[in-house]
Amino acid sequence: MEPNVQESIDPPELDATDRAMIEALVADGRLSVPALAERVGVSRATGYSRFDRLVDSGAITGFGARVAPEAIGLPVSALAFVTAEQGAWESTTEDLLATPGVQWIGIAAGTYDYVVLLRAASLAELRDVVLRELLALPGVRNTQTSVLLDEVRAPGAVL
C-alpha cells in the first residue's frame, strides 16, 4: 500500500471566487455545482469549469462525511508523538497507516518524526495500541502519547 504523502507541487493560482467556492464546500460538501455557483455568484458554466479545475489541480482532493467519533464508539482520542529509525520513514509510514486506531499521520521535523492521531473505544484499547502495536513496529524507536480531553474544529477548517 502506497502512503498518501503529499509531493511538492506548485499550488494552483486561486482567486477570490476559487477561495469562496472552497470555503462553501468546506462548510457544506454536499452542495451541487449549480448551488455552489449560485452561492458564489457565478454562472453554472463558470461554476462547473472552476470546480473541475480545482479538482484537477489537486486543490480539492475529495469529499467525505464528518463523523463524530464518540457516536461510532470511539470516544477516546490521543496524539502519539513517534520517534522512528532514521532512513526507514516510508516503511514506517506504511506500518503506522496499517495500525488499528490510526486516523491521521503527520510526518514532522524536530523532536518527533511523526504525529499520529489515534482513536479508541476505551483507555485500555488505547493503551494496547500504543504499547503493543506502535512500539512493536520495526521502525518505531519511541512514543510519547497525549490523551485529548476534547476536540474543537475551527470554523472553516479544511481538515
Image: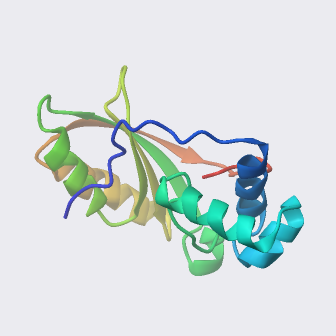
Q: How is the image coloured?
A: rainbow
* Above or below: residue 112 compared with residue 73: above
| Residue 93 can be seen in this image | yes
Residue sitting at 78 percent across and 43 percent down?
16
Q: Position of residue 84 (x, y in %)?
A: 21, 34
Residue sitting at 63 percent across and 65 percent down?
49
Residue sitting at 78 percent across and 77 percent down?
34
Q: Residue furthest top?
A: 110
Q: Between residues 109 and 82, which one lies in front from this camera angle? A: 109
Residue sitting at 85 percent across and 60 percent down?
40
Left-right relation of 144 to 52: left
Q: Answer with the quarter of the image where residue 99 lies.
A: bottom left
Q: Between residues 79 and 129, which one lies in front from this camera angle? A: 79
Q: Position of residue 73 (x, y in %)?
A: 56, 77
Q: Position of residue 100 (x, y in %)?
A: 33, 66
Q: Answer with the quarter of the image where residue 29 lies.
A: bottom right
| Residue 31 can be seen in this image | no
* Above or below: residue 76 compared with residue 150: below
Left-right relation of 92 to 10: left
Q: Between residues 25 and 155, which one lies in front from this camera angle? A: 25
Q: Position of residue 86 (x, y in %)?
A: 14, 28
Q: How many marks?
A: 0
Left-right relation of 50 to 122: right
Q: Between residues 78 and 39, which one lies in front from this camera angle? A: 39
The image quadrant where one finds the N terminus is bottom left
